[in-house]
């Protein structure tokens, strides 16, 4: 996945930095919330249920309010696209990790470590040119 960052116009929201469309951002936020609601870790079955709810348009974005004007909002997102455009990139970047032994998905801090490594790679590149 390619992330293009403008240091002078960096959004406040990490999902805006990572995902191209508002719908992808929303689905990613929903996934992380769902995972944290389940102690930050879910199994393959729960992930599949989440993806199926999205696919069938049953995933609730906004709960129904007390006023008749505050209706429940739901979102529909293709299951295959969820895995291809949301979950797989989040795993690849280290936002979510998959434990092969426990067969669970877990929210991870590896993204932060990855960004630090990228920064160190750049510093090494700068050093090469300063010494040469």
Image (cartoon, rainbow, N blue to C red):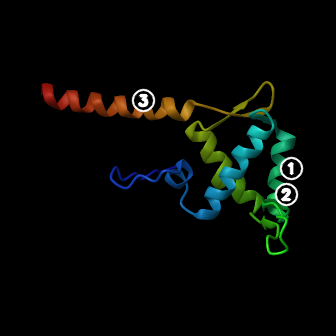
Q: Are marks 2 and 1 in contact (CB under 8 Å)?
A: yes
- In x, y percent, where is residue 9? 37, 56
Residue on which disc 1 sits: 49
Residue ranking furthest to the left:
132
What residue appears at the point 81 percent right and 62 percent down from the top-left corner? 55
| Contact (Cβ within 8 Å) of mark 1 with mark 3 | no
Compared across the picture, whether 89 is left or right of 70 comes to left
The image quarter in which residue 124 lies: top left
Relative vertical location of residue 95 with respect to residue 87 in this rendering, above or below: above
The numbered disc on residue 11 is none
- Residue in view at x 87 percent, y 42 percent: 45
Q: Is residue 131 left or right of residue 91?
A: left
Q: Which residue is mark 2?
A: 53
Q: Disc 3 designates what residue?
A: 117
Q: Residue most toward the front?
A: 67
Which comes sooner in the sequence, label 1 or label 3? Answer: 1
């Amino acid at each position: 996945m390619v992330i293009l960052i403008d240091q002078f116009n960096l959004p406040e929201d990490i999902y805006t930095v990572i995902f191209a469309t508002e719908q992808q951002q929303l689905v990613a936020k929903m996934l992380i919330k769902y995972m944290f609601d389940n102690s930050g870790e879910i199994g393959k079955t729960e992930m599949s249920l989440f993806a199926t709810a999205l696919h069938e348009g049953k995933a609730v974005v906004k709960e129904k309010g007390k006023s008749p004007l505050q209706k429940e909002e739901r979102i529909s997102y293709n299951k295959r696209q969820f895995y291809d455009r949301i979950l797989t990139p989040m795993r690849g970047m280290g936002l979510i990790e998959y434990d092969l032994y426990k067969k669970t998905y877990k929210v991870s801090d590896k993204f932060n470590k990855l960004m630090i490594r990228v920064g160190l790679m750049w510093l090494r590149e700068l050093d090469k040119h300063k010494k040469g």
